[in-house]
Image (spheres, rainbow, N blue to C red):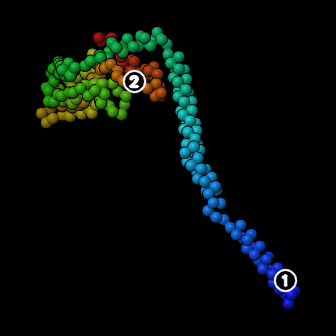
Amino acid sequence: MSRLATNTQKTSKEIAAISEKMKKTRLNLNDLIIPISVAVILLLLSIFVFIPMVNAALDYQEEIKETDQKIEQLNELDRKLSLLDENQLSDDIVLAKSVIPKVLKVSDFIYYVDNLAKEKSLIIRELSAGDMGGRISPSENSGAGVSGPISYQGEYSNVVSFLDEVQSISPYIIRIQNVEVAQSITGQWTISLVVSGYYMADRTGNLNIYKPFKAYTDYRDILDIFEEKAKNL
């Protein structure tokens, strides 16, 4: 009995010791405060420090890329400009200014067209025009201009002569579009078209030097037209 009591007492002590150890190893709220605090701090650092730093670095790389592209564009622009002859450029500017007015009044333009038609013995059927600014050709980089539909009637030879001279001997840079020629039952011929006269108003706003550049010398046919116009002035 004495031995059994001793063993029972020993077992009880071991169980009590194990229970005590389990109590000591059990997590409580105080044990979780520090890990949770560290996790919250790391999360806040990620949101307010690390992520903004990464985004800023990516934005900076994009800015560097854009800057490099602009530098390449400027270098290419400088190369193309260096190929232009300064003396020839000066002469061509004078030529362009001599044939493209800074201002073109609607009344002057209508007077020119109507006066030419009368010289060709044509009868007016429709004549109107308005200042379209830079909206004559929205799909192109056109200058400002006066544009409108016109229609005349007369002998076939006079109609053809008018159609030829309205551009060739005009003191203005003129473009004709939507030309229609038809014979009426009376034998007379009717010509209908849209005629546009250009002028070069003073430029307003800033010039975008990063837009694709094409040398004006690539438009040799237009320069030839300018030279022909200048001879008729």
Image spot of residue 43 (x, y percent): 58, 51
Q: Quadrant of the N terminus?
A: bottom right
Q: Is residue 76 left or right of residue 120?
A: right
> Could you tell me the amino acid type at mark 1?
Thr
> Could you tell me the amino acid type at mark 2?
Asn
Q: Is residue 217 left or right of residue 153?
A: right
Q: Residues within 10 Å of mark 1 (few under 14, many from 20)?
A: few
Q: Give the residue number, with chain letter if any, for mark 1.
A: 6
Q: Is residue 226 visible?
A: yes
Query: As displayed, is residue 102 above or below residue 141?
Result: above
Q: Is residue 16 left or right of residue 215?
A: right
Q: Is residue 110 left or right of residue 233?
A: left
| Residue pictured at 29% horizontal, 30% vertical | 136
SS label for mark 1: helix
| Residue pictured at 84% horizontal, 83% vertical | 6
SS label for mark 2: loop
Pick the front one: 158 or 195: 195
Spatial CA span between label 2 and label 1: 104 Å
Pick the front one: 3 or 143: 3
Query: As displayed, is residue 42 above or below residue 206?
Result: below
Q: Give the residue number, with chain letter if any, for mark 2.
A: 206
Residue 53 picture quarter: top right
